[in-house]
Amino acid sequence: MRTGTRIALLVGWLLALAGLGLLVAHNLKVSTDLRSFMPAPSTPDQKLLMEQVGEGPGSRLLLVAIAGKPDEQLGALSRGLANGLRKDGAFTQVVNGDFDLGVLDDKLLPYRYLLSPTLDSESLDKDFLADQLDQRLDDLGSPAASLLKGLLPRDPTLEVLKLAERWTPAKSPEVRDGVWFSTQDEALLLVQTKAAGFDPGAQGQAIDRIRAVFNALPDSHGADLTLSGPGYFSVVVNAQTRGEADLIGKVSTAGFILLLLLAYRNVPSLVFAALPVATGALAGIAVMTLAFSEVHGITLAFGFTLLGVAQEYPIRLLSHRRAGETALESVRGLWPLLLTAIASACIAYLAFYASGVGGLKQLAVFTITGLLAAGFTTRYLLPYLLPARVRDVADTPGLGAFRRWLDALPRPRWLPIPVALAAVLMLWFAPGPFWQNNLAALTPLPQDLLMKDARLREALGAPDVRYLLVLQAHSADGVLALSEKIEPTIQGLIGKRALDTVELPSTYLPSLAVQRSRQAKLPDRGTLDAALSAALEGKPFRKDLFAPFVDDVETARTAPLLTPGAFAASPLGQRLAAMLMQRGDHWVGLATLGGVHDAAALDVLARETGGQARLLDLKEASESLVAEYRTRILHALLAATVLLVLTITFALRSARRAWHVLAPMTLATFMVLAVERVAGIPLSLFHLVALILAAGLGLHYALFFERDTGDPAEQRRTLHATVVCVISALLVFGMLGWSSIPVLRAIGLTVSLGVAFHFCLSILMAPHDASKK
Amino acid sequence: MLALTPLPSGTASAPDAATLVASLNRPAPARTAFAEARFMRVLDKPLVVSGELAWLGGDKLERRVDKPQRETATIADGQVTQQREGKKPRSFSLQRAPQLKVLLDSFVALLGGDASRLSESFDVQLTQPANHWTLTLTPKDTRIAKQIARIAIDGAGNEPRCMRMEESDGDVAVDLLGELATKMPAEPTREALAALCAGTP
């Protein structure tokens, strides 16, 4: 090809890449919601689980500890932080043990008579008021006077205090200097964010706000602010995954370039060989942005890793070039095999698509598009660009000796039998559970963070993240009524120590019926005035002092009842909103439980309510979800395997040749499984994903080794290409194996092991060299 | 003895206040009877209670009310615990009751004879007209000063007789201490109490 045409082709290709790049830059929206990498829920419990994981009240809680200063200063910092955050719309609740009398704003304050249970047993008559006023006189003579006198004119029965007490978590930490303290001398706060827990972006902003408010406090210098909770974890995991993936990516790219320079000693070839992979990556992302509204960050990270397979195509082409042959001629000779390799890798990745998990589907679209683009550009574009004359890698020093050594290795035909036997024995005697069912193991967290979380949760009496009480009714008000109905039973269970604490939706808002009955007990203005005058008889209170009280009662008596919607504007309403949600034609309420000791005892609630109130074990729901998900993947894998066998047999047009390709691949896959199981690693979904990837690579090795050309130089070239591919795979995935993130580690370890087994077995089980016999 | 030394009237400088405070030192536990009249905006008439105040050493203070109703309030470790007969004890943070915080700071410093602690929390002023003295304490902490304008302690010799706590909203609590506690009138007025505290019969 003439130089001018080559330059035109190169420029055209680069322009096409730039166009794809522009398209991607324009349309790519990266999402960070970790749930898209979890299995799709199918039962109602599982659906609730997924919502809970992201948006439930428990997942929005951040636990905050301040340490490193004397108690008094920590107390001041805790109050300062709480005051700052309460003013911030990003937080729906901030509690630190300090009584917050501002929970009801001025507009809602009259509603205290409908919210507080006082009127269930009392009425605002002369006797009750006289008794209350006597008590207030005592209060005024006591040290608490300055606390109460401001409330007195508007609220002589102290309903605000009763409500504040009712809304304070039942099991609170020790109070020192007016705020919560842990036994380890940290001031504690509970902060509920408006943002969903598993949205690391929004959680990150909320956490930055907390830190900013804290750092702006005087004396905050030198004090340590510690955070924990699901939202914080999602931020940590996100940052950690991104950080490690970036680092690993950089190091392995550098190593990869070095390896190729050593292997081919030709810079232009190397630069051009990068084009198919770049095309694959950009085309993959471009198709994803067109097919999905948002692309998950993890898809991108994993996708680039999986696309590493595509690097094999140009490598094969470079290795198989020989002196006197144009690149085009080389690629024509290779193409049938290369096409088989591409098709089989695509089939393996199709299994991801069948998994039904949003993130994995994206991954499948990305990698299959990428593989096809890389493969076809290697075939139809790259050969025209490569320099005409190259060094034949068959002459690489040492390669011939290596090949001879490999050929001299004994290759007993019975080899598959002991290998298969060893795999079966190892699988049989492997310790520990076979499958990893714990969803939490997929979203990795360092152990010390989890321990810290458990400690703070315990100290704060924060709700259990495992159990939830699900209340179901036809309307929001029905849920509230149900919540009221089961309250006595639950209190009984708390008395029997089946659980420690409960937070019911009706704690925050009584049902309409209860509000109505309380409202009906409120006296009209004339009646109240008369009762109050009679009660004030002989007491030293200033006349007309209680006019604001009379006004409030009148307001409460005539006000429209409070609904969750009307309540939503206040911080407490936000809290309630997190506990109430509409599901199609019915409403679901969620009560958080703390310290569940005897989950079976809570079954009585389901019996009493005919199943309308029931305990949801999030762990159980998540495990069933994972198990179902795995079954789905296994089925998809099975289908992929059948397709693969058919494809290979068809491509090679010989069952015997197909056996030489498929047998080492299958055996190696089982060996990886067996070794990991013997090492005590329970298998997660990500191990399965990685096994598929390794099998795809192994298939390439077996395909090329099986190709018997009878030409020793060509055999050396095959060996050269395979060794370069194996080393580059080990480089990339071996690095991943060192990662601190379980998911990355699972993939790295599995693929590295797989590559090693596939390489060894495909050599040892390749057909005997005909030329030597 | 301080009481025997004829003192010039007018404002004394800080060292004199320190000498006076040092002379008030008592070993813990120190107890004194008290009668308190509270003049509050929410009330037409002052509220009168009486009982015993005790410094139990350290930062522990006990205020026991005998009349009209028995009630004990204990201040310890930043917490106030109120106990009333036949009722559950109730506690709240000292931070929420600046009155008590001020009471604790001033009382402990006075009974411990600790002038430096006193001046940590308050601006201290000593005036000594005729045969008695008045220590005026103004809280330094602006948060507390928003609620408590000042405390004035009247005494003669090394014997405090009266404590007057003026809140920023105009409410005043006057405590007659020691022997003077028995002299609380049935219907006290601010003027009558001021006279009692000044030692004019």
Image (cartoon, rainbow, N blue to C red):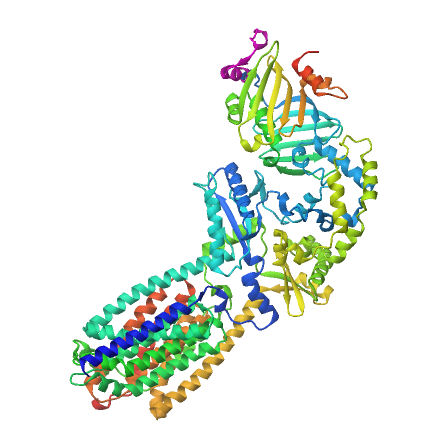
Q: Quadrant of the C terminus of chain A?
A: bottom left
The part of the image, by quadrant, that contains residue A263 is: bottom left
Q: In the displayed structure, does residue A725 sit left or right of residue A198?
A: left
Pick the residue in front: A570 or A190.
A570
Residue at position x 51%, y 55% in the image: A229
Q: Residue furthest bottom?
A: A653
> Residue A174 location, x and y as percent?
58, 43
Q: Is residue A756 visible?
A: no
Residue at position x 30%, y 74% in the image: A15
Taking A410 as reference, is B115 above or below it?
above
Q: Quadrant of the N terminus of chain A?
A: bottom left
Residues in magenta, as a range:
B1-21
Q: In the displayed structure, does residue B189 sit left or right of residue A721?
A: right
The part of the image, by quadrant, that contains residue A444 is: bottom left
Taking A256 as reference, is B199 above or below it?
above
> Residue A446 location, x and y as percent?
44, 57
Q: In the displayed structure, does residue B147 sit left or right of residue A16?
A: right
> Residue A311 location, x and y as percent?
30, 75
Taking A421 as reference, is A206 above or below it?
above
Taking A217 as reference, is A521 above or below it?
below
